[in-house]
Amino acid sequence: MAVAKEEGGEVAEPSLWERMEQPAPVPRASLTLERIAAAAVEIAEEEGGAAVTMRRLATKLGVTPMAAYRHVSGKDDLWALMIDRVSRDLAVPDDAGDWREVLRSYALRTRELMLAHPWMALMPTSVVLLTPSRMAVAERGLSALDAHDLDADSVMAALRAVTSFVHGAAQAEIAMRDYQERNGWTSGDETREALAPQMRYLIGTGRYPVFEKYALTANRKDDRAWEFTFGLDCVLDGIGQRLGI
């Protein structure tokens, strides 16, 4: 059980991350936050994010649910540990130069991470962001923008604009991939063929001429990486234009 400490005359429990950095009270403790995080990630990778429950975790660890609750207060703590664990290699390369290169690298690496661990798309945004690993990457992006003597509100808003784009785009990509897998469609062509009756009716109403043009002439319908980087560059162009950097 976490040891309470005094803050302003009131007893407060150390945060999850404070406890993570503290040595285990028992040198050979069989259950640690690191072990809990690793087990939870394994469950999510093998069975999906929805399978990660305190009871399932306890079973995998070979302990009682109450033993797990002595280390994490509930699912939010568990999710945070999982996000932090898989995000440890997310750091922007040291040779990344200006603010645009830093934010672009951050965005591309985050997309890759989410596609590799699709259960991340289920996580609440606050949990995804507020972990040591994620904060370290955010700090790098904020510092790259702050170097241009911008006000604090603009710096944070710009970073959040990039983060929102990345998470929205990656979540949509994961959802489509899941939809295709559930229906047994292995390619974009198979997906479009299966949905063709609906599409023909909608296009046939004459209400969507630009969408019809896209359907008939677009060459990159299944190139998700290109679509992502194009959208990302539009966001970065907008930030640069708006902030004059």
Image: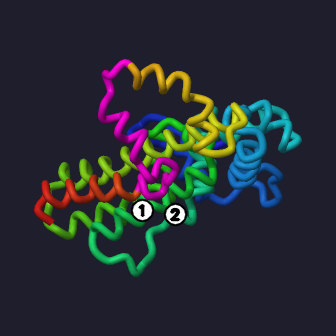
In the image, what residue occupies the spot 70% across and 55% down? 34
Which secondary structure, mark 1?
Answer: helix
Please tell me whether residue 74 is drawn above or below residue 146 in the rendered image. above
Q: Which mark is residue 172?
A: none
Residue 223 within the segment the image draws in magenta = yes
Q: Judge left or right: residue 221 versus residue 138.
A: right
Of residues 20 and 240, the one nearer the viewer is 240
Q: Quadrant of the N terminus?
A: top right
Q: Which residues are magenta?
A: 205-228
Q: Quadrant of residue 7?
A: top left
Q: Residue 212 magenta-drawn?
A: yes
| Residue found at x 32% / y 77% | 97
- For residue 90, the mark is 2
Q: Residues within 10 Å of mark 2 (few under 14, many from 20)?
A: many
Which tag, 1 or 2, sits closer to the chain's start? 2
* Circles 1, 2 touching at the beta carbon (< 8 Å): yes
Residue 69 visible, this angle: no
Q: In the picture provided, is 203 more to the left or to the right than 1? A: left
Q: How is the image coloured?
A: rainbow
Left or right of residue 96: residue 61: right
Q: Which residue is mark 1?
A: 106
